[in-house]
Amino acid sequence: MSYLVDVLDSSWKRPVIKSLRWRDAGARKVYFVSAAPAAVSPNVYGIDMPAATELIAHGRSAEEINQLIGADGLIYQELDDLVAAVRELNPNLKTFEDSVFSACYITKEVDDAYLEALALSRNDSAKQSVAGDSEDACLDLRADAS
């Protein structure tokens, strides 16, 4: 028996395959497959993503990630293939924002200093210090909240 694992969250810090206990469930082989390229950089244009150092693919090769998560194989979508697929749908599209995958930002203001400041404000420990560990720290904005 083999398992194919497709995980969208690229920021897991613990070994994914080992923590999910796929092997304990009887899998002899476990493959990690992502329908997206490896996320190596944060999005700075409005999406609250982990700091670059919290992304599993930041600064790591596919082989290193594979060893870290304990899989038998690791497959990411290639960025060039993703670009080709999008262009097939819209041939007029010449470029698009792919900094999460390429670490190339379309605005010139994004430099190392900007990314360092962003990492200090967006990393997990910064978020925890703002939110606290209490449920009282969360503001409930649901319409049915009392």
Image: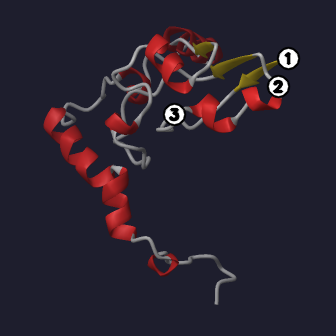
Return the disc, 2 or 1, that comes first in the chain's sequence. Answer: 1
Question: Which residue is tagged 3?
Answer: 10
Element type where label 3 sits in the image: loop
What crowding class fits label 3: few (fewer than 14 Cα within 10 Å), some (14-19), or many (20 or more)?
A: some
The C terminus: image quadrant: bottom right
Quarter of the image with the N terminus is top right
The residue tagged 2 is: 26
Residue at 33 percent of width and 49 percent of height: 123
44 vs 92, left or right, is left
Q: CA distance from mark 1 to mark 3?
A: 25 Å
**Vertically, is 61 above or below 109?**
above
Q: Amino acid at mark 1?
A: Met
Q: Secondary structure at mark 2?
A: loop
Residue underneath mark 1: 1
Place of residue 33 in the rendered image (x, y in percent of width and height, measured from the top left) = 65, 20
Q: 110 and 11: which one is in front?
A: 11
Q: List x then y, in percent, for residue 84.
A: 56, 9
Between circles 1 and 3, the one closer to the viewer is 1
Residue at the outermost front position = 24
Extreme residue toward the bottom, this view: 146
User: Counting other residues with Cα less than 10 Å from the Cα at mark 1, is it few (<14), some (14-19), or many (20 or more)?
Assistant: few
User: Disc 3 versus disc 2: distance between alpha carbons?
Assistant: 25 Å
The answer to which of marks 3 and 2 sits earlier in the sequence is 3
Q: Is residue 143 left or right of residue 79?
A: right
Q: Residues within 10 Å of mark 2 (few under 14, many from 20)?
A: few
Q: Amino acid at mark 3?
A: Ser
Q: Where is residue 51 drawn, in percent x and y?
A: 34, 42
Front disc: 2 or 1:
2
Regarding mark 1 in the picture, which secondary structure is present there?
Answer: loop
Q: Amino acid at mark 2?
A: Gly
Residue in the foreground of this view, choosing between 64 and 103:
64
Q: How many marks?
A: 3
